[in-house]
């Protein structure tokens, strides 16, 4: 039972994040400049910058960042809520 709840949360975060981010990027061009656009569509970038490691015979790069908007957070909570209700 606990495994299913954790799976629903991960699925809700993934689906809500994808849909919320896509809508955020699509709707950015529709709204005029102003405080409403800044509130809903300005992204908070969380993560760390790219790190390059070169060992001579082997090199790799590692980096991770997540852009979070208010619309993304709304859709994450909506997706989790809908997954629990269905």
Image: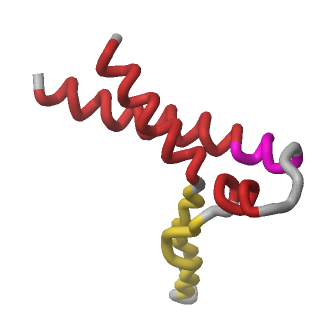
The structure residue drawn at horizontal position 37% and vertical position 30%, both measured from the top left corner, is: 80
The location of residue 18, given as percent across then percent down, is: 58, 38
Q: Does 70 appear above or below 16?
A: below
Residue most extreme to the left: 1
Quarter holding the N terminus is top left
| Residue, far top | 86
- Assign the C terminus to one quadrant of the image: top left
x, y (%) of residue 34?
81, 62
Residue range of the region highlighted in magenta in the rendering = 24-29
Reply yes or no: does residue 20 show up in magenta. no
Q: Position of residue 73 (x, y in %)?
A: 49, 47
Give the farthest residue toward the front. Answer: 35
Quarter holding residue 19: top right
Q: Residue at x 60, y 40 (%)?
A: 20
Toward the viewer: 13 or 51? 13
Q: Is residue 85 left or right of residue 56?
A: left
Relative to residue 68, is residue 85 depicted above or below? above
């Amino acid at each position: 039972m606990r495994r299913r709840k954790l799976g629903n949360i991960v699925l809700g975060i993934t689906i809500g994040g994808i849909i919320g981010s896509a809508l955020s990027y699509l709707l950015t061009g529709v709204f005029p400049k102003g405080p409403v656009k800044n509130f809903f569509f300005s992204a908070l970038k969380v993560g760390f910058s790219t790190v390059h490691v070169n060992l001579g015979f082997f090199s790799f790069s590692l980096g991770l960042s997540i852009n979070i908007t208010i619309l993304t957070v709304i859709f994450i909570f909506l997706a989790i809520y809908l997954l629990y209700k269905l």
